[in-house]
Image (tube, rainbow, N blue to C red):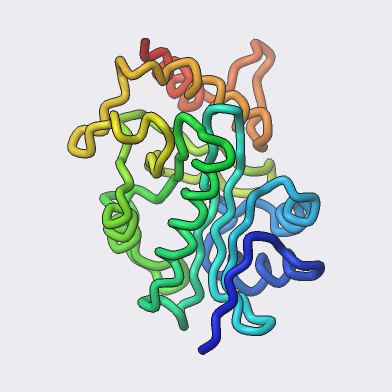
Amino acid sequence: MQIEYQNHLEPGQSEILVRELLEQAFGPEELGEPEDLIAQLQAGQFQTFSAWEGTRPLGAAIAWPATSEIALLSWLAISPRTRGHGVGSKLFRQTISALESSNNPLLILGEIEDPTSHSASEDHGDPQRRWAFYQRLGAKHLDFPFVMPRLSADVPVGEDMWLLSFGGRAHADIDAGTGKIAGLGLGRPLEKFLKTYLADSGETVNADGKYRIEIEKMLAAANLD
C-alpha cells in the first residue's frame, strides 16, 4: 500500500473526503450537514491533513482555529482498511505539531463520545478504544461539563461528550489524572472559544437571549478564575 500524506486538499478532494470517509465515521450529530462541510473545506475554513491511496481517502485530521488562543481538532477519521497501520497516529501528530508551530495556541482541544456512556457500534467504532488511542498520544480528559453545540438546526444533539486537551502551551500544566483546569488562567479563553463555537453552530437563543439550559450551565462553568 502506497500512502501519500497531504497538508492541503486538491480540487475535488473535499467531497470525496466527506462522502467516502467522514460520513462513514461520524453520525450527523458529530458531522453536521455534509454539504455545509464540503463547502467549508473548499473555502479553506479548516486546516486539513489527509492520507490517500491514489484517489481513495485513508484518513483525515481536520482542525478549526476557532480563536487566537484555542483550536479544535474537529474530526479525526481513519478508513477501517488502514486501522493499525499508524495512519491515525501520524495524522494526529502532524496536525498537533502544525498547529503548535503556526498558531502557538494556548490549547488544542478535541471532543469524543463519553466512553462510559456510549457503546461500541459497527458503524462508528468503539468509544473506549478511541479514548485509549488518544490517551496513548497524550490526550487529557478535562474536568469540565462540556455540552457539544448542535452543529446545525437539522441534525440531532450530540449527547454525553467529553472535551479533551491534545496540546498547546497550557497542555503540560493540566493534570492527566484529574483533568482540573481551574486556576490555570484558562477561564476567559475557554469562554471565548465556547461562545465562538456556539455562534458558528446551529444553537439558537430564546426571547431572553439564552441558550438551552445545558449550554448556559456550561458557559457559567467556564468562569474558572
In the image, is 66 to the left or to the right of 80? right
Q: Is 173 drawn above or below residue 188 in the view shown?
A: below
Q: Position of residue 1 (x, y in %)?
A: 51, 89
Q: Quadrant of residue 18?
A: bottom right
Residue 170 in view in this figure? yes
In the image, is 182 to the left or to the right of 155? left
Name of the residue lying farthest toward the bottom? 1
Q: Position of residue 91 (x, y in %)?
A: 49, 62
Name the residue at 38% across, 16% down: 185
Q: Position of residue 83 (x, y in %)?
A: 41, 76
Residue 119 in view in this figure? no
Q: Position of residue 29 (x, y in %)?
A: 56, 51
Name of the residue lying farthest toward the front? 101
Name the residue at 58% across, 70% down: 5
**Nearer the observer, 170 or 126:** 170
**Nearer the observer, 99 or 70:** 99
**Nearer the observer, 94 or 54:** 94
In the rendered image, the quadrant that contains the C terminus is top left
Q: Quadrant of residue 223?
A: top left
Q: Is 188 drawn above or below residue 180 in the view shown?
A: above
Q: Is 183 drawn above or below residue 66 in the view shown?
A: above
Name the residue at 30% across, 49% down: 138
Name the residue at 55% across, 75% down: 58
Q: Quadrant of residue 103?
A: top right
Q: Is 27 drawn above or below residue 166 in the view shown?
A: below
Query: How many discs mark residues in the rendered view?
Result: 0
